[in-house]
Image (cartoon, rainbow, N blue to C red):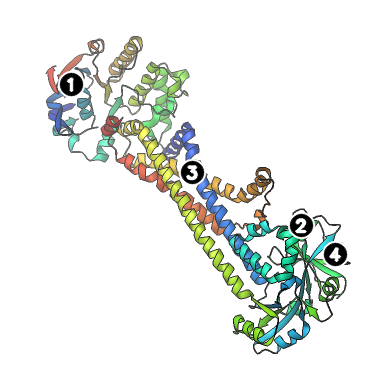
């Protein structure tokens, strides 16, 4: 379902070339619950952004459902991100002026929020234990609650894939555990593929497959 | 996939408003930037319009034709005298159509308290630089006698009196001159005891049609029945009282044949300057004031003022535009992660552009409306605040001097909205082009 073929990403930092990803060949099947581990600067986030179509590789192809997203135009790529992929960020990236339900519905806003969308947003927040926090602003929520809102936002469009970049990085152990359990539940119940970037072995132990990266290369799968 | 409804625009607008309300301090700053620029534009424009309007009124008070005023040398219109024979001499000059006699003086109204005596400061305030010219001309017209009068009193004290104007209503009507507009009652038809008063005087004294007023000039006093209220658009004469030539002569102690000045109307297509030169050549001891030339000078002064007004307005609008640009850019720089996130979760470039444009449009529209309201209220606020802040400085009647036109409001709306929207769109375009990864890296 997701395939990377000889994906290389080189960044320019002044006169220096920095390798973010090097000849990465990877296949991820539908419904996988996978983690990507590695030290800082190993290229974990780079790989995640390349898979998610947020960045273009210097060379190589990224295929989602057999379609090479590297060759896609900006508009089509946006649609892929909107319809097929959900993103979860380390710092939650919620919009501070919007409530929990409004943040959940943000991906739908440009096309219009239907009653179905609203109902799904409410249902997601309720199932994540945020029923009485629906009208709260991010500043009024704990870190764990904010990240649950971020997961709801990632799932609002019923995506096939959720890409999580250090989702537990800003959370305490208990909240982190709850979050991973929540993602696992969504993976089992809804069949959503989860790719989780983490440097926490406790998190990776809970995933069914772990890829280790070092200096932009896969060293263990 | 979730089905989508038709409420997209509403929700986007809702999000834009929430963003504005959630960043209240910045929103208020940007609203103020637009509002201040627009209010200054409205305030300055209304002042210029008002000055032009007043000047139009003053021009109207000269009649529908250009005119030359002939008065006695040395004494000017208030203290000089001309013999009626001079009027007949002027009447025989080729190209002269009408010669209308007038008597002028500074009189006092007995038993009447003026709520706002006209002062020299007010006259200057009313007319700006042009007022200075008028004052200079007036002092010049008053001549040596006036100089002596002024030595003891000063212009401001002198201006606490009202202007007494002696007219021949029949001749004034022919030349459609004094008064140009009756706003209540009618002009007196009796040569004795009838008077009309200016609107400003009526407002400040409480006198009205049917009232009796006692006018004092030197040691003499006469009672007049007010038959009408007029308005000529000239603050000095609008604070005056007009009576018959005969009554004015009696009060001033002038001879039956004497007048203060002759207003000379030339035939069509005859230059007022030419008539002035003829009068100078034919009549001794007569000084000439070419009203057309004076109005032209005043017009030039107003044009000059307008240039300054446009410069100030341009600076204020550019400053406001720059402020909005900087504030929006700053706001976007602080929202880089937010914009990156929106792009990452599937927002297209036009969606981001639309959101930020909606925010700046809302600020531009609300700020412009606020600015127009403040601009309209500015003269009233100025008038109310000035006596509190500077109790010793006379306040010009700003509310009477400003004129708000629909064109001013429309221009203010267009300029305010355009500068606000463009100030927001430029950074919005930059923001919408940002790739999600670049946005996250920038953070």
Task: Evaluate whether label 2 is on the same chain as label 4.
Answer: yes
Mark 2 or mark 4, whichever is nearer to me = 4
B64 left or right of A221 in image: right
Q: Secondary structure at mark 3?
A: helix
Q: Secondary structure at mark 4?
A: strand
Q: Which residue is mark 1?
A: A42
Distance, label 4 to label 3, CA atoms, is 54 Å
Q: Which residue is mark 4?
A: B216
Answer yes or no: is residue A109 visible. yes
Distance, label 2 to label 1, CA atoms, is 86 Å
Q: Quadrant of residue B325?
A: top left
Query: Marks 1 and 2: in contact by CB < 8 Å?
Result: no
Rendering coords of residue B414 (x, y %): 48, 53
Query: Marks 3 and 4: in contact by CB < 8 Å?
Result: no
- Comes first in the chain, label 3 or label 2: 3
Depicted B194 relative to depicted B282: above or below: above
- Return the residue nearer the eye: B229 or B81: B81
Q: Quadrant of residue B326?
A: top left
Q: Quadrant of residue B135?
A: bottom right
* Chain under numbered label 1: A
Distance, label 1 to label 3, CA atoms, is 48 Å
Rendering coords of residue B71 (x, y %): 71, 77
Distance, label 1 to label 4, CA atoms, is 102 Å
* Chain under numbered label 4: B
Rendering coords of residue A124 (x, y %): 39, 21
Dot label at residue B428: none
* Chain under numbered label 3: B
């Amino acid at each position: 379902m997701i395939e990377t073929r000889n994906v290389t990403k080189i960044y320019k930092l002044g006169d220096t070339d920095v390798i973010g990803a090097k000849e990465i060949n990877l296949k991820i099947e539908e419904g996988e619950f996978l983690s990507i581990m590695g030290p800082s600067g190993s290229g974990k986030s780079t790989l995640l952004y390349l898979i998610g179509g947020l960045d273009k590789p210097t060379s190589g192809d990224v295929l989602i459902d057999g379609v090479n997203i590297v060759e896609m135009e900006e508009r089509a790529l946006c649609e892929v991100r909107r319809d097929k992929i959900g993103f979860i960020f380390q710092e939650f990236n919620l919009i501070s002026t919007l409530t929990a339900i409004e943040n959940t519905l943000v991906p739908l806003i440009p096309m219009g929020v239907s009653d179905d969308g609203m109902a799904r947003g409410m249902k997601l927040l309720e199932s994540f234990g945020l029923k009485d926090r629906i009208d709260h602003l991010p500043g009024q929520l704990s870190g764990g609650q904010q990240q649950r809102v971020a997961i709801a936002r990632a799932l609002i469009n019923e995506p096939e894939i959720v890409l999580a970049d250090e989702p537990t990085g800003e959370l305490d152990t208990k909240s982190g555990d709850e979050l991973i359990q929540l993602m696992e539940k969504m993976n089992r119940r809804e069949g959503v593929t989860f790719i989780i970037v983490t440097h926490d072995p406790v998190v990776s132990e809970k995933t069914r497959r772990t890829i280790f990266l070092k200096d932009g290369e896969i060293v263990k799968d | 996939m979730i089905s989508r409804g038709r409420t997209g625009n509403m929700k986007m607008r809702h999000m834009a408003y929430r963003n504005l309300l959630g960043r209240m301090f910045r929103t208020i700053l940007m609203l103020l930037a637009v509002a201040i620029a627009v209010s200054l534009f409205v305030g300055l424009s209304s002042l210029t319009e008002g000055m032009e309007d007043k000047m139009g009124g003053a021009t109207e008070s000269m009649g529908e034709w250009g005119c030359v005023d002939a008065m006695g040398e040395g004494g000017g219109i208030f203290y000089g005298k001309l013999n009626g024979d001079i009027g007949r001499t002027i009447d025989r000059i080729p190209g002269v159509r009408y010669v209308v006699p007038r008597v002028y003086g500074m009189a006092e109204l007995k038993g009447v308290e003026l709520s706002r005596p006209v002062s020299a400061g007010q006259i200057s305030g009313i007319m700006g630089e042009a007022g200075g010219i008028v004052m200079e001309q007036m002092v010049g017209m008053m001549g040596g006698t006036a100089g002596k009068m002024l030595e003891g009193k000063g212009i401001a004290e002198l201006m606490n009196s009202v202007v007494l104007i002696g007219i021949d209503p029949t001749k004034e009507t022919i030349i459609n001159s004094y008064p140009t507009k009756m706003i209540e009652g009618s002009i007196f038809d009796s040569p004795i005891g009838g008077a009309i008063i200016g609107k400003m005087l009526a407002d400040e004294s409480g006198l009205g049609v049917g009232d009796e007023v006692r006018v004092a000039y030197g040691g003499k006093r006469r009672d007049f029945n007010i038959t009408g209220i007029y308005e000529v658009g000239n603050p000095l004469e609008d604070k005056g009282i007009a009576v018959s030539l005969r009554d004015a002569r009696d009060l001033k102690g002038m001879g039956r044949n004497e007048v203060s000045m002759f207003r000379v109307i030339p035939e069509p297509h005859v230059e007022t300057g030419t008539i002035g030169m003829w009068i100078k050549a034919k009549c001794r001891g007569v000084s000439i004031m070419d009203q057309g030339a004076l109005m032209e000078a005043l017009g030039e002064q107003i044009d000059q003022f307008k240039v300054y007004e446009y410069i100030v307005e341009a600076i204020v609008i550019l400053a406001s535009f720059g402020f909005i640009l900087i504030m929006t850019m700053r706001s976007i720089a602080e929202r880089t992660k937010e914009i990156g996130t929106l792009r990452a979760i599937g927002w297209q470039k036009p969606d981001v552009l639309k959101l930020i444009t909606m925010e700046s449009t809302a600020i531009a529209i609300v700020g412009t409306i606020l600015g127009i309201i403040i601009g309209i209220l500015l003269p009233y606020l100025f008038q109310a605040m000035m006596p509190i802040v500077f109790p010793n400085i006379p306040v010009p009647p700003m509310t009477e001097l400003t004129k708000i036109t629909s064109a001013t409001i429309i221009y203010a709306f267009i300029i305010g909205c355009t500068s606000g929207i463009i100030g927001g769109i430029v950074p919005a375009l930059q923001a919408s082009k940002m790739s999600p990864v670049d946005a996250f890296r920038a953070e």
